[in-house]
């Protein structure tokens, strides 16, 4: 199933599809991100470009939602502050690389080398979240709260930027700038779709 076909179908990891709880939702998004990296690495032409744009979109909205919902919740947990600080630093580095790659495009010279670096960084980041952040959430918050957090993540994703914006890693910055930047990003997405 191609990227364009998937976009029209509700499934885990995308706004509009309710997960059991925030941890389940984010695990599913991590799986989708892994799959999209594989597609970008193994396809060419329009299929590769479509997979790349879908990967950029998913990474951008995923990180925005984590910054607005997950990180603040983990920070409130005893011992959570250093865990979040490490994840935010990883996210910032990945956003900078993703932003550069989005500007040059998947056909540019050197893109494949950057893609390997981005993939390794993002997947290591996802593993760190799954090993250090998610257990803290599960330990401290009850199922009802985790389900409400999933709804909040999906709401945040609905207004999140669809492109990387390094330097906008705080919840306040995301809430203040996110909707404006998202409108610009979504306009660019619509133009790209029309122009092919």
Image: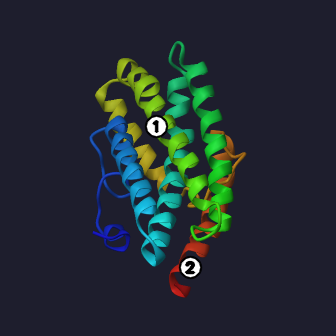
**Location of the N terminus (image quadrant):** bottom left
Location of mark 1 (residue): 126
Residue in the image at 55% along x and 73% along y? 189
Residue in the image at 52% along x and 84% along y? 196
State the image quarter where residue 102 is shown: bottom right
Spot occupied by residue 107 in the image (x, y as percentages of width and height): 58, 71
Tally of marks: 2
Task: Give above or below for 29 relative to 6.
Answer: above
Q: Is residue 122 left or right of residue 177?
A: left
The kind of secondary structure element at disc 2 is helix
State the image quarter where residue 7 is shown: bottom left
In this view, the residue in front, 134 or 72, is: 134
Location of mark 2 (residue): 192
Spot occupied by residue 37 in the image (x, y as percentages of width and height): 44, 54
Q: Are marks 1 and 2 in contact (CB under 8 Å)?
A: no
Q: CA distance from mark 1 to mark 2?
A: 29 Å
Spot occupied by residue 58 in the image (x, y as percentages of width and height): 47, 56
């Amino acid at each position: 199933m191609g990227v364009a076909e998937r976009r029209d179908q509700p499934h885990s990891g995308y706004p509009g599809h309710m997960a059991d709880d925030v941890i389940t939702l984010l695990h599913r998004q991590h799986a989708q991100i892994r799959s999209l990296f594989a597609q970008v690495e193994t396809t060419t032409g329009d299929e590769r470009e479509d997979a790349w744009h879908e990967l950029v979109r998913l990474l951008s909205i995923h990180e925005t939602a984590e910054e607005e919902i997950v990180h603040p919740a983990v920070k409130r947990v005893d011992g959570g502050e250093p865990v979040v600080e490490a994840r935010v630093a990883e996210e910032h580095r990945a956003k900078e690389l993703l932003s550069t790659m989005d500007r040059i495009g998947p056909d540019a010279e050197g893109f494949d080398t950057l893609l390997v670096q981005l993939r390794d960084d993002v997947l290591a980041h996802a593993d760190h979240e799954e090993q250090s952040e998610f257990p803290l959430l599960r330990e401290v918050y009850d199922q009802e709260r985790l389900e409400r957090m999933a709804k909040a993540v999906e709401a945040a994703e609905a207004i999140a930027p669809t492109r990387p914006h390094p330097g906008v890693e705080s919840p306040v910055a995301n809430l203040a700038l996110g909707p404006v930047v998202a409108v610009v990003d979504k306009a660019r997405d619509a133009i790209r779709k029309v122009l092919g």
